[in-house]
Amino acid sequence: MADILQIKNLSKRYAKTVAVDDISFNVKQGQCFGLLGPNGAGKTTTIEMMEGILPPSSGEILFEGKPIDKNYYQRVGIQFQHTAIQDFLTVKETLSMFANFYKQSLSSAQLIEMCALQEIVDRDTRKLSGGQRQRLLLALAMLNDPKIIFLDEPTTGLDPQSRRNFWQLIDNIKRQNKTVLLTTHYMDEAESLCDEIVIMDTGKIIQRGTPNTLLKDHFDGVLVTLPISIEPKLKSMQLDYLRNNQVVEIMSANVDQTIRTLLENEVPLEGMQVRSPNLEDLFIKLTGHQLRG
Ligand SMILES: Nc1ncnc2c1ncn2[C@@H]1O[C@H](COP(=O)(O)OP(=O)(O)OP(=O)(O)O)[C@@H](O)[C@H]1O
């Protein structure tokens, strides 16, 4: 697959902060690429530079091998976190109004189908739920049939069902060989949607790869989780573990052996869970802190 975007030594410096600090990566055509990181990591600054709306302090962005120019906006779609939608218009009227901004646009019928807007086409945009509003914003970003679509935290604040519905739409868009670039705080979102991710912290890239490879590279086995109350016992056994909120997590390459050891040491197993490590665990392992907070 060819690279649709190349990010080379990109930085954004403000008077008191280096928001993005010399990052480089490529995005392949047709890929869903995720920018992950905690609050203030530099995700929004990075995506806004990639969207062409924020000038970098240094470095460059190539779109299909060339510096981005004024035609870029005809080729890309952007779903902003807070797009102002005109009051007193229906969903269909809103789509028609925004279509005027582009030389070429998809038909309303195509967008309505693509973004599951059938039941709300005649609804006043002030009466939309959070999930419906996000679907309309997605349709607006898809209006010009872009090659690449940028989504900045598209599902923040949505209920779990609406988030999953939204993921389905993104999946359908990916199937049309569109490139999707998204920022997210949600690790399950990244694991479900992204072919490749970069994890950012304090303006730098700290890891890059496919979710699966990153997890395989950093974890060997599963996590055995127990209530925090057994921590003193684990300390006395000199067993390696991580503290995560109200639980302790033991990394185990052999669950049977770990459970035998715990039983031999009379550790109560009530409340025990066994699970595979996820990107959230990886983030904590790499940075020592959680994504939210
Ligand atoms: N216009 C600005 N002027 C000064 N500093 C800024 C500006 N925009 C962003 N920053 C700083 O740059 C850093 C990165 O911010 P950015 O919004 O890119 O992070 P983020 O990863 O998107 O965080 P969040 O998840 O909270 O949106 C932060 O320290 C932020 O305060």
Image: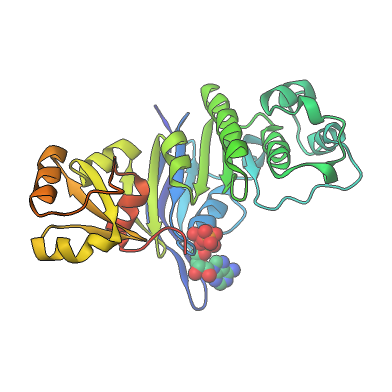
Residue 268, compared with residue 17, is above or below; it is above
Is residue 5 among the parts visible in the rendering?
no
Would you say 103 lies left or right of 17 here?
right
Q: Nearer the viewer, residue 243 or 281?
A: 243
Give the percent coordinates (x, y) of residue 133: 73, 42
Give the percent coordinates (x, y) of residue 163: 58, 39
Q: Quadrant of residue 195?
A: top left
Q: Nearer the viewer, residue 162 or 111?
A: 162
- What residue is at 34 percent from the left and 44 percent from the top? 278
The outermost residue toward the right is 88
The outermost residue toward the bottom is 16
- What residue is at 88 percent from the left and 48 percent from the top? 87
Give the percent coordinates (x, y) of residue 121: 83, 29
Would you say 264 lies left or right of 118 here?
left
Give the percent coordinates (x, y) of residue 82: 70, 53
Q: Nearer the viewer, residue 113 or 246?
A: 246
- What residue is at 74 percent from the left and 25 percent from the top? 112
Would you say 166 lies left or right of 112 here?
left
Question: Which image quarter holds the N terminus?
Answer: top left
Q: Nearer the viewer, residue 184 or 131?
A: 131
